[in-house]
Image (spheres, rainbow, N blue to C red):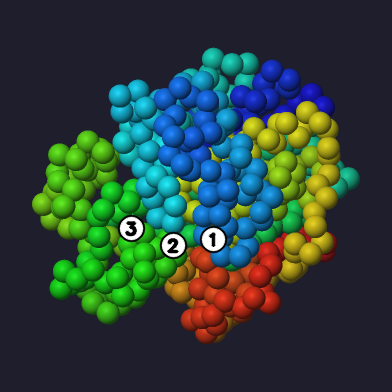
């Protein structure tokens, strides 16, 4: 093996490229600027067992890998894979030391690494940078390293499909038709927030890697599990109001100024993300037209501006002085637990194809991701995929009992009409959003069959084709899971069913076009 193509320039893709460059000939492709990614917008931070870091400023907090693992497994609602969780938590401290070595400047107080608390974490183990600009701190440090390295970088370069020969991925096709070949293709294409009209994700998050992988015959897993963040600013753009704000003590109040989450869960505002998101949605339904508000006023304007400078600016841009008035918040699509099925080395079910970061599903997040575990995932697994490639283990061996398989029929109805992105997003929000039910999902499935993939003449058409195939897969898997678990909530099956405590998987039929 000599050459590698990495698709995507978030934390996962850039980490992989940097790890690989001393051994392989590496080409990094990204569809916008290097900096444009979910990574760049990440706020709250990175969860890690700080005690185990080698950094001289790492404080002793009484935290442990076992505790981080336990919190991650609880958030995953019975579906997180203990092996991939264990790797994440055990290898996390070294990965953060590596990021610091690559120039990431996490916030410090008197030289000691600062550390915040977020929902469902037993310890205040969240490293952050620039207050609430952790993702930017990581992205720009890695960009500097990538630009200074021998990685061949091509920005504004959209990958539209994988080249498969004899069942093996041998390269990629770019928008416009150019083909690039390599011994391995690593998809680090990030999430799928643009499946929904309200999302914290930037415009590039259109599930491209997942769409391409499904068309190439790869198995995808857990596609019914999507995470909605409880608190985005209720204003165009849905700017994220980090969980760390609630971690610092902000509370959610209803139209009467009452803390309604106290009646929903013993941990109130710091309950698991899906519980808080649904609690807010239910409260919104009870007080139509009057927003739910996040009251951070007790923290004081000076603290808020210093600790959360970007959220502070976003609030002020909407006319809110959140040091004085509670701000309107609403749930928004945020993170995809499901993705291209991989093992702990990023290997997919198709030889030559690898996936890491939010585009992948190695089982780590299960039915719900623990806050601040995904930047960590990108750093840990972005590195591991290259370690695995150096060992030249071409095909993943998946546990047979891991999968509950479903077929994805990719054939378009000849009478179907071109997909409209806005219609698709609204359909997904209504039928496959925070609360789902069998009747709406079945209706959505038949509606999605009436839309066909557009001809790929430009980048938007390529994205729409991916959103359509992924939307069909999400709806099919959400319909098949007749229980509620983590990010998947069915009003017609509100209980968790222990018999369904297994991952789902979906792949295109062999005869798919
Ligand atoms: P991304 O960072 O999304 O990168 C994907 C890359 O792929 C992009 O460069 C994109 O342009 C490129 N790409 C996509 N399709 C193509 C294509 N067809 N051709 C070429 N290139 C393509 N997680 C945390 O752990 N802590 C946090 O505090 C946190 N805060 C967040 C706040 C916000 C507002 C958001 C949106 C997410 C947050 N997350 C956080 C989640 C986290 O940021 C992401 O899960 C993580 O950064 C994903 O990294 P990635 O490298 O897998 O993908
Ligand atoms: C946040 O800052 O609330 C986002 C953290 C995350 O998604 O992990």
For label 3, being within 8 Å of ligand 2 is answered yes
Q: Is residue 131 above or below residue 482?
A: above
Label 2 close to label 1 by CB (< 8 Å): yes
**Image quarter in which the N terminus is found:** top right
Q: CA distance from mark 2 to mark 1?
A: 9 Å
- Depth check, mark 3 against mark 1: the one in front is 1
Q: CA distance from mark 3 to mark 2?
A: 13 Å
Residue shown at 57% from the left, 57% from the top: 73
Q: Earlier in the sequence, mark 3 or mark 2?
A: 3
Of residues 463 and 240, the one nearer the viewer is 240
| Residue 152 coordinates in the image, percent (x, y) | 62, 21
Crowd class of label 2 (few under 14; some 14 to 19; many from 20; radius 10 Å): many
Name the residue at the right extreme: 166
Q: Is residue 229 left or right of residue 255?
A: right
Q: Which residue is mark 3?
A: 231
Q: CA distance from mark 3 to mark 1?
A: 21 Å
Residue shown at 63% from the left, 63% from the top: 79
Of residues 309 and 307, the one nearer the viewer is 307
Q: Which residue is mark 2?
A: 272
Secondary element under disc 1, as helix, strand or loop, is: helix
């Amino acid at each position: 093996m000599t050459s590698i193509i990495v698709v995507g320039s978030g934390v996962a893709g850039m980490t992989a490229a940097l790890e690989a460059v001393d051994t392989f000939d590496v080409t990094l492709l990204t569809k916008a600027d290097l900096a444009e990614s979910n990574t760049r917008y990440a706020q709250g931070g990175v969860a890690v067992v700080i005690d185990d870091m080698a950094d001289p400023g790492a404080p002793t907090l009484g935290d442990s890998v076992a505790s981080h693992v336990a919190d991650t497994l609880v958030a995953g609602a019975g579906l997180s894979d203990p092996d991939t969780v264990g790797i994440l938590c055990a290898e996390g401290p070294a990965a953060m030391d590596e990021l610091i070595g690559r120039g990431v400047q996490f916030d410090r107080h008197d030289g000691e690494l600062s550390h915040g608390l977020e929902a469902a974490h037993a310890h205040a183990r969240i490293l952050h940078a620039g207050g609430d600009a952790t993702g930017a701190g990581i992205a720009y440090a890695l960009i500097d390293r990538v630009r200074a390295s021998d990685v061949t970088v091509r920005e504004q370069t959209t990958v539209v499909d994988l080249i498969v020969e004899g069942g093996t991925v041998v390269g990629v096709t770019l928008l416009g038709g150019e083909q690039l070949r390599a011994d391995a293709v690593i998809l680090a294409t990030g999430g799928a927030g643009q499946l929904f009209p309200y999302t914290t994700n930037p415009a590039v998050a259109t599930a491209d890697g997942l769409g391409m992988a499904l068309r190439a015959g790869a198995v995808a897993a857990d596609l019914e599990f999507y995470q909605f963040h409880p608190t985005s600013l209720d204003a165009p753009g849905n700017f994220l109001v980090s969980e760390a704000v609630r971690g610092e003590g902000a509370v959610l109040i209803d139209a009467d100024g009452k803390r309604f989450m106290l009646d929903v869960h013993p941990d109130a505002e710091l309950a698991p993300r899906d519980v808080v998101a649904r609690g807010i949605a239910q409260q919104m339904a009870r007080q139509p037209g009057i927003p739910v508000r996040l009251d951070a006023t007790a923290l004081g304007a000076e603290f808020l501006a210093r600790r959360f400078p970007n959220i502070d600016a976003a609030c002020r841009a909407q006319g809110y002085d959140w040091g004085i008035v509670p701000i309107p918040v609403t749930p928004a699509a945020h993170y995809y637990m499901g993705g291209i099925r991989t093992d702990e080395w990023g290997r997919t079910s198709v030889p030559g194809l690898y996936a890491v970061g939010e585009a992948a599903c190695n089982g780590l997040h299960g039915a719900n991701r623990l806050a601040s575990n995904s930047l960590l995932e990108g750093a840990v697994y972005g590195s591991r995929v290259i370690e695995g490639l150096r060992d030249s283990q071409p095909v993943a061996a998946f546990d047979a009992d891991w999968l509950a398989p479903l077929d994805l029929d990719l054939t378009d109805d000849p009478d179907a009409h071109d997909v409209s992105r806005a219609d698709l997003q609204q359909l997904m929000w209504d039928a496959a959003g925070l609360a789902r039910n069998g009747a709406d999902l079945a209706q959505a499935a038949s509606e999605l069959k009436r839309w066909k993939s557009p001809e790929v003449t430009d980048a938007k058409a390529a994205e729409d084709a991916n959103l359509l195939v992924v939307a069909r897969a999400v709806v099919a898997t959400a319909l098949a899971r007749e229980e509620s678990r983590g990010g998947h909530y069915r009003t017609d099956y509100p209980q968790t069913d222990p018999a369904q405590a297994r991952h789902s998987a979906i792949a295109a039929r062999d005869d798919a076009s």
